[in-house]
Image (cartoon, rainbow, N blue to C red):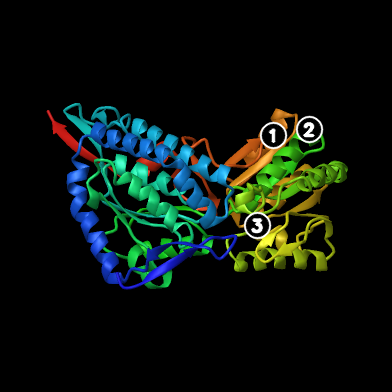
Amino acid sequence: MKNEKKVYSVSGNEVFGSLPLMSQEEVGDKIHQASAAQGSWGSTEVYKRAEILHEWAEQLVKKQDQIGEVISKEVGKNLASAVKEVVRTADLIRYTAEEGCRIHGELLKGDSSKGGSSNKMAMVEQEPLGVVLAISPFNYPVNLAASKIAPALISGNAVVFKPASQGALSGKLMIEALLETDLPSDTIQFVSGKGSEIGDFLVTHPNIDMITFTGSTETGQAISQKAKMIPVVLELGGKDPAIVLEDADLDLAAEHIVSGAYSYSGQRCTAIKRVLASDTIAHDLSEKIKQKVENLSVGTPEDNATVTPLINNEAADFVQDLIDDALSKGAELVTGNRREDHLVYPTLLDHVNSDMKVAWEEPFGPVLPIIRINETEDFVSLSNQSQYGLQASIFTKDVQKARDIATKLDVGSVQMNAKTERGPDHFPFIGAKNSGLGSQGIRRSIESMTRDKLFILNL
């Protein structure tokens, strides 16, 4: 390996590791190795694949503190949350192993439809696609990587794993834990390097048979266009609204909104990124949110703070620009708008309108706009005008009203009286519009990584 990249901590200049900057030739070798190994892995009994995944989960539990510490340093997540991510990932892998053993084919009779034949029966089996390219983001470098890798492996695919540049060291440790099991080593391939150097090479390589990606909408759209005829599953951006109706429990709403908007500094696609509140209760809600925001701990991951430095200065600049734009156009600063390098303090804005960028753009940072709404139909209209359609929350005591609004929202999931969030991991996870393509969640992910094959019996 000719070149390496030093890995720095988010909150300081500490160098605590390095990663290879692979060339296209090196990446190509990795892909060919995975392709050569897939046939043997694909013919391995499912229960044996499941045993290996269970071993992987146990290895992660044993290494939870070590991997958690690296996650914390590398992506700025507080240590408790980082360790929790590793433990949650082990649970996800175990569930994937068990679910994979429950994926069966089916038997179809030929005379079940008009014009069919009673002399024909079809045995429908599910086959692996081949080599799955798994591309993960920085914010959940272990969980969102394993949510791609584990379903691919249990269904008999080989995997080429490309983590985000920041978060890659955590991902590498996760793969090292996997390689301590009985998994044939060539079945999983770790690649790292500059996206400008190896990105297009990876997604257009003829030996890649499926791509599963989590990241920005812009990058996801580019991957979709370049992938052409191979299956693609995309988990992209969001602008998740919290819709608060006039009969809502405001204390409950404020609690979930603050947790949903500001945990891990808002660096989550499922973070609450705007509040659409009935005008009659907006002031009271704003005050309740303000009190909770001002009690949030702000500092470094080492302090176990809730709001920590953003992933880099570019991300902080983007968030600051959204705040400055809103204030210049008449938004009210309720609290926040303080910055130290790439640590942005939790910021709450009220009286935001549709002329402000923060009403539409995904900040991926700790800023939350409140938009005041008069009519029920306006909640739906304003929500659906967004290019995104990941999730929404509705806070109300009227279940029927929540259901009526939910059916009109162009999103993948609607939460009632709770924050938007990913999981449980076996629930389907879907993004509408520019928030994604395809369905995830353990069973859905396994199904997306297999194809049907028929063996027809002519009796």
Say what amino acid the circle numbered 3 marks: Gly
Percent x, y of residue 355:
76, 64
First in sequence, mark 1 or 2: give its number: 2
Depth check: 90 or 173 in front? 173
Q: CA distance from mark 2 to mark 3?
A: 26 Å
Foreground tag (2 vs 3): 3
Helix, strand or loop under label 1: loop
Residue 143 appears in the rendering: no
Asked if labels 2 and 1 touch by Cβ distance under 8 angstroms, the answer is yes
Say what amino acid the circle numbered 1 marks: Asn
Label placed on residue 365: 3
Say what amino acid the circle numbered 2 marks: Asp
Instruction: Find residue 151 and report its image quarter.
Output: top left
Mark 1 crowd level (few <14, some 14–19, many ≥20, 10 Å Cα) = many
Label placed on residue 249: 2
Percent x, y of residue 101:
30, 30
Mark 3 crowd level (few <14, some 14–19, many ≥20, 10 Å Cα) = many
Percent x, y of residue 358:
71, 60
Left/right placement of residue 81 relative to residue 46 reads: right
Label placed on residue 417: 1
Label placed on residue 91: none
Left/right placement of residue 457 relative to residue 255 reads: left
Depth check: 337 or 332 in front? 337
Mark 2 crowd level (few <14, some 14–19, many ≥20, 10 Å Cα) = some
Asked if labels 3 and 2 touch by Cβ distance under 8 angstroms, the answer is no
Percent x, y of residue 90:
42, 37
Left/right placement of residue 291 relative to residue 209 reads: right
